[in-house]
Image (tube, coloured by chain):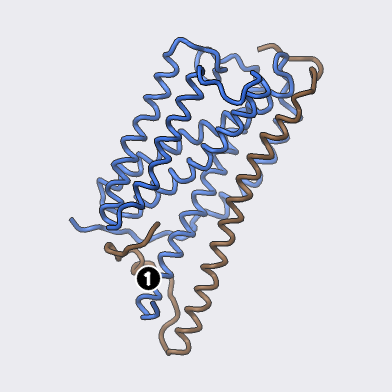
Chain colours: A blue, B brown
Amino acid sequence: MSSRTSPPKHGRGLRPLSIATIAAIPIALVLVFFYAPIEVEEGFLQKIFYLHVPLAIVTLCGFVIGGLLAIVHLRTRDRSWDLRSYVAIHMSLIFGVGTLITGSIWARGSWGHWWVWSEPTLVSFLIIMLLYATYQPLRFAIEDPERQARYASVFAIVAGAFVPMNFLAVRLSSSYLHPRVLGSSSNLPPKMAFTFLISLVAMSLLFATLCSYELTAKRTRMLLKARSRTLGFR
Amino acid sequence: MVLATSIPGSSNNGYVAAAYIVFFAIVLIYVAIMALRLTRVERDLRDLNERAETTGGAAPNETHGAHEAHNLPRERERV
């Protein structure tokens, strides 16, 4: 089966996206530290919530988006979709590491432990991270680029489907020790909810901008290699 | 959720600072790595242009090269 390709779009929309991100992050920080009220039980420590939860949400959404992009790749055989899927998962892994670290810091401050193995939300997130940690070794263990893209896409789809299933399973579990943010049990005051929403938007913009930078850099490098090969330099 | 009228015991401020510092450190490290990689690409591009000029070949062209880069299905390179 031959591979179809589409002309690349180098860095289209990168500048407005970067400007939006650079504007959104300070706004979110100002809201977090000067607008959102202090929660009585956790006090100032609750400010980690505006960082940790958007990070976790964006990470999980990134994994799912990676799976959806992989579906498009398998349907169209256009390798640029595989590249997009790879970048989304790659970036989600980086954000996932941030989620684990900030979550551990919050757990230490709130519960007195860096990690609580009996907490399903933490353990399920760790399982997802460990699952995706095998994505890159799997991908780069395959030499043939066609097979590499195909196998990586299959992995991304299966793992991407696992993410919402895992999320639902944890939701349906009996333990509600971990704070719930979204859904019917959410009881955030309006100021906190607004700050959380802006933090989530800022985090999503950061994710999209970094993905866009990564994609542009990778395409430029591929272009350069192809051009130098055409000119007979390598 | 109950809100406090004043900042309760602030012994946990260090954790908040640590969480935000760790996050921004991760982003900064990533951006620094990206910048290094782009510097390398820039250097390679300059080198390629110079070599193309000395050998009389055409300088790398975005439109032409873009299709070349994407029409290499057997190319063995890591994305």
Q: Amino acid at mark 1?
A: Ala
Q: Quadrant of residue A61?
A: top left
> Which quadrant, please, contains the C terminus of chain A?
bottom left
Query: In the rendered view, would you say A109 is above or below B4?
Result: below
Q: Chain of mark 1?
A: A
Q: Residue at x 45, y 65 (%)?
A: A221
Q: Is residue A201 visible?
A: yes
Q: Which one is in front, A27 or A113?
A: A113
Tell me the SS state at disc 1.
helix
Q: Residue at x 36, y 52 (%)?
A: A140
Query: In the rendered view, would you say A234 is above or below B10?
Result: below
Q: Residue at x 38, y 43 (%)?
A: A135
Query: In the rendered view, would you say B34 is above or below A44?
Result: below
Q: Position of residue B15 (x, y in %)?
A: 71, 29
Q: Quadrant of residue A103?
A: top right
Residue identifier under label 1: A226
> Which quadrant, please, contains the N terminus of chain A?
bottom left
